């Protein structure tokens, strides 16, 4: 049965993968046999992360560009076409957070969060899906949602709107692309120990709230998302489409 989860011969592109959750997912997909393409906005951090994976014996390359820039995304895919790199698995992971009450939130900050967390997934997936459809071999798209794809939280209105949008964008992708053997699904991480969450982790009151409100009574780790990502990227999920799987320690299961 292990062949169901074997990603050998496939290439996975993970956005926002120079560090944090994106890097953990890229490393996990590589460990399952995939050749991975890392991405970030800084060429030096992307190169450093690629070097770590290559040193560990994995097949990895990187390309630095802004996934909210449609022209830059199109250029990247065009270059991969010329280089013979076929993206079989896309993980839309790039994301940012900005905390401020909605009544105080500037439109520019709202737009920046929406563009990074939601619009980029559309931009990148459009390029990937066009090629998956043309090749006629199908493919896998994994969008990274959040607990806020399902539940609202104060001071993160733009992020909540974006991640709620990710859930519905995933369903829209499934509605249009399932016929081409493309499975589009999403992962909804719970509270994960990442650099982006560092201010929350170091806030004693918030840390206590996370632990007390979660049946598992702890934060999750990036590595705990890898199994779900490998499953959704593999033949094991060939009839799973338009779903969002929450990896949250049971947070959404309780009041």
Image: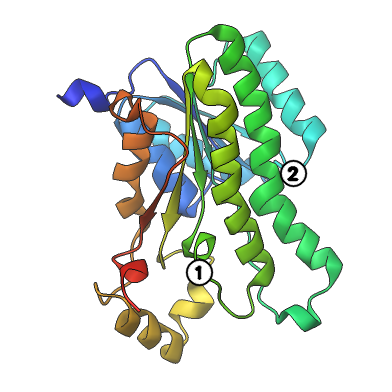
Of the 4 image quadrants, the one containing the N terminus is: top left
Occupied quadrant, residue 238: top left
Q: Is residue 94 visible?
A: no
Query: Residue 72's x, y, as percent?
Result: 77, 32
Residue placed most toward the observer, 133 or 207: 133
Foreground mark, 2 or 1? 1
Occupied quadrant, residue 249: bottom left
- The relative height of residue 182 versus residue 24 in the rendered view (above or below) is above
Under circle 2, the secondary element is loop
Under circle 1, the secondary element is loop
Residue at numbered disc 2: 68
Residue at point 43% right, 38% down? 26
Residue at numbered disc 1: 151
Left/right of residue 251 with respect to residue 95 in the rendered view: left
Q: How far apart are marks 2 and 1 (CA)?
A: 25 Å
Residue placed most toward the observer, 255 or 44: 255
Left/right of residue 21 with respect to residue 132 in the rendered view: left
């Amino acid at each position: 049965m292990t062949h169901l989860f074997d990603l050998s011969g496939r290439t996975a592109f993970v956005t926002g993968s120079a560090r944090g959750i994106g890097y953990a997912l890229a490393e996990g997909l590589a460990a399952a046999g995939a050749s991975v393409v890392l991405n970030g906005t800084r060429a030096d951090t992307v190169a450093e992360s690629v070097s770590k994976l290559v040193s560990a014996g994995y097949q990895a390359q990187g390309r630095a560009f802004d996934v909210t820039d449609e022209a830059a995304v199109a250029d990247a895919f065009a270059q991969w076409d010329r280089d013979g790199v076929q993206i079989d698995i896309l993980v839309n992971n790039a994301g940012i957070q900005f905390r401020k009450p909605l009544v105080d939130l500037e439109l520019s900050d709202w737009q920046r969060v929406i563009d990074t967390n939601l619009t980029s997934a559309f931009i990148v997936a459009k390029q990937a899906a066009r090629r998956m459809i043309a090749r006629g071999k199908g493919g896998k798209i994994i969008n990274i949602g959040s607990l806020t794809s399902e539940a609202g939280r104060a001071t993160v209105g733009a992020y909540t709107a974006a991640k709620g949008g990710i859930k519905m964008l995933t369903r829209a992708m499934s509605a249009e692309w399932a016929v081409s053997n493309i499975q589009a699904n999403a992962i909804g991480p719970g509270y994960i120990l990442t650099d982006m969450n560092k201010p929350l982790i170091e806030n004693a009151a918030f840390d206590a709230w996370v632990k007390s409100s979660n049946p598992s009574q702890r934060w999750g780790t990036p590595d705990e998302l890898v199994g779900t990502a490998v499953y959704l990227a593999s033949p094991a999920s060939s009839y799973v489409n338009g779903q969002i799987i929450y990896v949250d320690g049971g947070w959404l299961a309780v009041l």
